[in-house]
Image: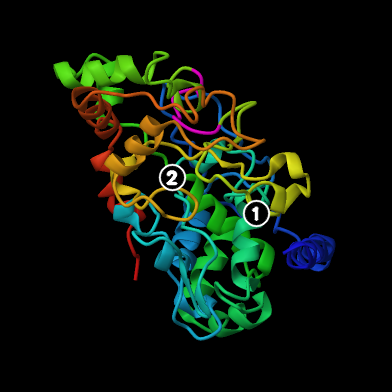
Amino acid sequence: MKKLILSIVVLFIGFSACKKDLPPDNPTHTTTPVAFPKPSNFPAPNLPADNPLTKEGIALGRHLYYEKRMSIDNTVSCASCHVHEYNFSLPLPYGIGVNGPTHNSVMIHSNLAWQETLLWNGFASSIEQVAYLTIIDPVEMNSTWEISLGKIENDPKYISLYEAAYGPNAITTENSIKAIAQFVRTMVSGDSKYDKWQRGEEQFTTLELEGYQMFNDENGDCFHCHGDYTTGGLFGAYGDLQFSNNGLDSVLLPNLGREGATGDSNDRGKFKIPSLRNIEYSFPYMHDGRFTTLQDVIEHYNMGGHITYTIDPNMKKAGIGRNWSQEQKDALLAFLKTLSDNAFLTDTSFSNPW
């Protein structure tokens, strides 16, 4: 695992070093700026100054996101694992690459503009880095950028898309990565029933309100990692709390979780805290997809989790259990479903442009 990570780091550093050999952006080329679609109740996003959103860049990125020719055997695209109607995740306990299943379940691609680290172990620090690594990953696409772009460089559609986004002779690795990242950053979900309730446009049912209150009190104890106010409305990793060992296992294997990226045994068994937005459609759950339903997830937290040396201190009932009533579990489930944003899950601007 460490050798693989080191190899990927070297490859990415090599890509970064080679960027100076790529043709510079055409200073006379003009594009159409796009304002970032930030919901009013969200904090400021992490937007790179060197990759501003443009109408043309997003359009190119959308085509590349759904382009199967980017994989070595023309069978897999980004969208093969990140399926729109499943919150850009996949309803399997693993992703499917050209060389079989991936090691972990597929993380969602919504609201990534607010994330400082990406992937279950936080190995990547930007959407651009994830886009670069996906093509060369031996399981996922098992290609090189030279091979992948060589397949499309004479395609009239792509020639037009790249020229619109970056000017002539612009089919480069750097431009491709930037375009994909632009498209992914527009995947913003912030119009669920919860958001409408916050704006006074809809009302919670009695059960949903009970679930929200339990979610935010010490009985439910969900708010430490997923609270609306503690995470800026993201309901997932934000700020100081990015990774957690939530007591899934009683024995922690070496290099499991965050340790695989940092090499620090104190990070063993800690995984990226995912957002609960659209969680109803982001099944199965946890890094290995071990839980099929939200009821399974609720039962895990009800039993309290397994005690290990890196368990999150917020798992205060580990080894003891919480003894929630059926009504309390139903209330939590009802609240979690208010985080579903159906408009986002059916927005045609994210659909396959082909």
Q: Is residue 102 left or right of residue 22?
A: left
Amino acid type, mark 1: Leu
Q: Position of residue 251 (x, y in %)?
A: 60, 48
Callout 1 secondary element: loop
Between 310 and 237, the residue placed more toward the observer is 310
Q: How many marks?
A: 2
* Label 1 sits on residue: 253
Quarter of the figure that contains the C terminus:
bottom left
State left or right for residue 264 relative to residue 130. right
* Residue 201 falls left or right of residue 217: left
Q: How is the protein colored in the picture?
A: rainbow
The residue singled out by tag 2 in the image is 110
Q: Mark 2, mark 1: which one is toward the viewer?
A: 1
| Residue 155 location (% of width, % of height) | 49, 82
| Amino acid tagged 2 | Ser
Question: Quick one: label 2 or label 1, which is nearer the N terminus?
Answer: 2
Query: Range of the magenta residues?
Result: 230-237
Q: Quadrant of residue 240?
A: top right
Relative to 22, residue 117 above or below: above
Which residue is nearer to you in this view: 80 or 212? 212
Q: Residue at x 42, y 45 (%)?
A: 187
Residue 333: image quadrant is top left
- Choose between 301 and 99: the one closer to the eye: 301
- Viewer-side residue, 141 vs 50: 141
- Residue 155 lies, with reference to residue 122, above or below; the image says below
Give percent across and percent down for residue 314: 54, 23
Give the distance between the C-alpha atoms of the residues marked 2 and 1, in whole angstroms: 30 Å
Residue 235 belongs to magenta span: yes
Q: Is residue 19 left or right of residue 332?
A: right
x, y percent for residue 257: 63, 49
Badge 1 crowding class, 10 Å Cα cut-off, few under 14, some 14 to 19, many 20 or more, is few
